[in-house]
Image (tube, rainbow, N blue to C red):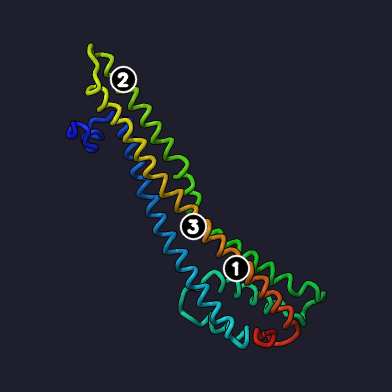
Amino acid sequence: MNQDLDIFQLVAHASVVVKAVLILLVAISVMSWTAIFRKIIHLHGIKHQNDVFMREYVSCSNFESYLNLLRQRNRDAGPMERIFESGLSEMQKFPPSRATDPRTVLERPRRAMRACFQREMDAVESNLSFLASVGSVSPYLGLFGTVWGIMHAFTGLAALQQVTLATVAPGIAEALVATAIGLFAAIPAVIAYNFFARDIDRISIEQETFIDEFSNMLQLNYGAPASPNAAR
């Protein structure tokens, strides 16, 4: 009995449609786990880059010299560093001395930082929709395989004159394997999606807070050398 209900034998004896569903679910599960591990590494790198930038930003004495130092470095810039660079670069293109309306001086760098922020968040949120789709669709794919397998099992039983539990159990078990694989693909994707969504919200709040603080810093240093320590 245990040998007859071995999962590999059940899959081997399943119908073609059920096998196709199982193969699809296994492929989806592999892609889901790949996306999960890549997102873990990606978010960890973003947090580290932002932390390093904030430590340097707080300790720097002049924004423009710090921007030149960042441009000379041969390393990948983090999201917050790119937001800082976009805002200060826009300020350098249109300094206060060239402004016809002083009220609009900070609007250009702020818009530049908001645009950069949106691009960074689009990159951070990549693959989240895929995990959400896996979490919502995989159980239904597994259910489809189960329903089809049960239909196939009962169709085969119709030709038998005597039906017992021993003859029904293998066919039902074959069908239920699809549901199990569907849940195996969906549950990790849902958990990972919720975990990543929480971390991404924190990153978004930190970067929006930095935009507000840096905008205030530029305003305090309006018409003077851009120095964070001077404003503090």
Location of residue 222 by image quarter? bottom right
From the viewer's perspective, is 212 left or right of 69? right
Picture layout, residue 35 above or below residue 147: below
From the viewer's perspective, is 191 left or right of 70? left
Location of residue 118 by image quarter? bottom right
Quadrant including the N terminus: top left
The amino acid beneath tag 2 is Phe
**Disc 2 + disc 3, Cβ < 8 Å:** no
The amino acid beneath tag 1 is Gln
CA gap, disc 3 and disc 1 = 16 Å
The residue labelled by disc 1 is 207
Tell which of 64 and 40 is nearer to you. Answer: 40
The residue labelled by disc 3 is 196
Residue at the spot 72% in from the left edge and 77% down from the top edge: 94
Labels 1, 2: front one: 2
Tell which of 52 and 191 is nearer to you. Answer: 191
Question: Mark 2 or 3 closer to N-term?
Answer: 2
Question: Mark 1 or 2 closer to N-term?
Answer: 2
Element carrying mark 3: helix
Residue 109: image location, x then y, percent: 69, 72
From the viewer's perspective, is 81 left or right of 36? right
Location of residue 69 by image quarter? bottom right
Residue at the spot 28% in from the left edge and 28% down from the top edge: 15
Residue 136: image location, x then y, percent: 47, 41
From the viewer's perspective, is 156 left or right of 225? left
The residue labelled by disc 2 is 154
